[in-house]
Amino acid sequence: MILAPAGIVGSILLVLNAQLGLTKVVFSPSSYDWSDYKYKHALSSTMQLPEGTPVGIPTVQFAFPAESAQESATRKTRQKAVLDTFTKGWASYWGYAWKRDELAPLSGTGKDTFGGWAATLVDALDTLWIMGLKDEFYEAAGEAAKIDWAVTEDTSVNMFETNIRHLGGLLAAYDLSREPALLSKAIELGDILWAGFDTPTHLPPFMFDFKQAKNGKLVLEDNQSSAAIGSFALEFTRLAQVSGDSKYYDAIARVTSLFVSNQLKTNLPGMWPMFINARKGTFEQTAFTLGAVADSFYEYLPKMHYLLGGQEPAYEEAYRDAMETAIKSLLFRPMLPDKDDILVAGSAAVAGGKATLNAKNEHLGCFAGGMFLLSGKLFDISEHVDIGTKLTNGCIYSYDAFPTGIMPEISQMHPCPSFEECEYDASKFTDTTLPKGFTAVGDPKYILRPEAIESVFYLYRITGDSKLQDVASVLVEGKPAQEDSMESFWFAETLKYFYLIFSPPDTISLDDWVFNTEAHPFRRPK
Ligand SMILES: *[C@@H]1O[C@H](CO)[C@@H](O)[C@H](O)[C@H]1NC(C)=O
């Protein structure tokens, strides 16, 4: 296959293909071409993408038996309810915010939160495909293939968000539809983001400033989110695999090397601090978490092992070391009146060489259940399947506990001394207006986040427990205050995971696909 590069020859080829009816999406190049960008901070060599045949990858999904007519009928009714929710939202986006980054659902307008590059449209492409909305998919893909990355009102763009939403979205849409125009658009964007790694430490900045980047003068911060630095691995690896260009893999492999070589030297050996010094490439801070600010860096370790077919052992080693520490210092069993056997991913602060647990319960931390479950299967660690199950049940518990049926963005609980059951001590819970087991609610919002349903999805596909389909269909009661914002991950992640739970298990099977942190499925090389 010829992979058409961004540029004039590529677009002629694609137009010809389209006229011959071989492809339906027509590529239109951006007005500024980053493909010939040369690094100002020299590299002595390029790390090559490992491309051998996958080794030692076990089956991940449960061997589901055929469903009964009754089960099928219930499943389809629920699936239809998710589809209807999606199409209702999509019609509003189409009508009120087409090609904008986000729909503002109360005011019925659009807003641009990520460079004005149609974030919701790009983020939703693969969901449209998976839900069988092919006309809508091709309409949106046609627009995505015309995005001009040089046209933006902003002088800089958030590298992490652009990578997980736009690049991840285009790659998954390409993997599903095989439309070359989407790959060409992904390569154009990949070339921009790749320039973001041209810094003295070869770590990317938080914000990609176009002017600074063109001069090779991107500014790194002394205090930068570790997830925002370390969560390019899957997208850049998939881009290297489908484009055949190792330069994208090289950029993230350098970041991995730096993290791995510091992994056992941090204040909580095995884990990396939430914030790192990107300018110096050092890891000196004392706050650690699996939740916000650090989350997807950890999530990508087992997924990289999977996407690379086990060809690079560093990812499994890093995952095992990190989780050994996380299990000891961050996970806790909350004190509960009925002594439910659940776990929650908290955070820790280190002082004087000693880690102190903060029994925080974050919605963002709910991804951890899915990570432990997938890794437990991939690396054959039954303890991790068990922990992943209990973490997922911790999120289900937190959803059930609140009157809306939805857990808050941030709450506090009280930890048992160990993972063993402990007596409920009512004196620890002074705020009696809160559900039992919660000591405080730091942030009561729910912003359509996917992490809990994501872990329920992994638990269902891995254990085959159909009770999880009932859990996923809990109805929300009451009418809380509303925000004038519909994050693009509502289509990209939340509704996709709901839809997949009510789809036949071979729809985007976990044995064939690896999800990025925005729920974009990448095809796993076999
Ligand atoms: C880093 O930034 C975070 C979030 O803004 C802040 O809480 C933390 O104190 C900062 N750390 C340092 C060392 O500046």
Image (cartoon, rainbow, N blue to C red):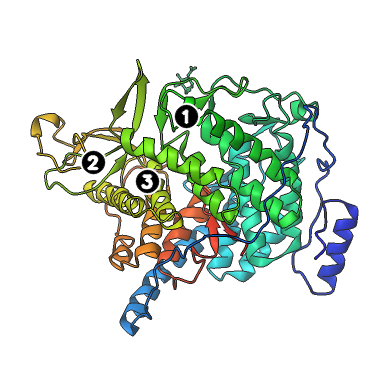
Q: Quadrant of residue 322?
A: top left
Q: Position of residue 491 (x, y in %)?
A: 51, 55
* Foreground residue among 218 and 233: 233
Q: Disc 3 residue type?
A: Cys
Residue at point 47%, 35% (across, down): 294
Secondary structure type for disc 2? loop
Please give the name of the residue rendered at 48% of the width and 52% of the height, measured from the top-left corner. Answer: 490
Q: Residues within 10 Å of mark 3 (few under 14, many from 20)?
A: many
Residue with the mark numbered 1: 264
Q: Position of residue 391 (x, y in %)?
A: 31, 48
Q: Please state the horizontal and vertical placement of residue 166, each as a whole percent of the image.
A: 63, 48
Q: Is residue 230 above or below residue 451?
A: above
| In this rendering, the label closer to the viewer, 1 or 3 | 1
Q: Residue furthest bottom?
A: 69
Left or right: 10, with 472 as reference point? right
Q: CA distance from mark 1 to mark 3?
A: 25 Å
Q: Amino acid at mark 1?
A: Leu
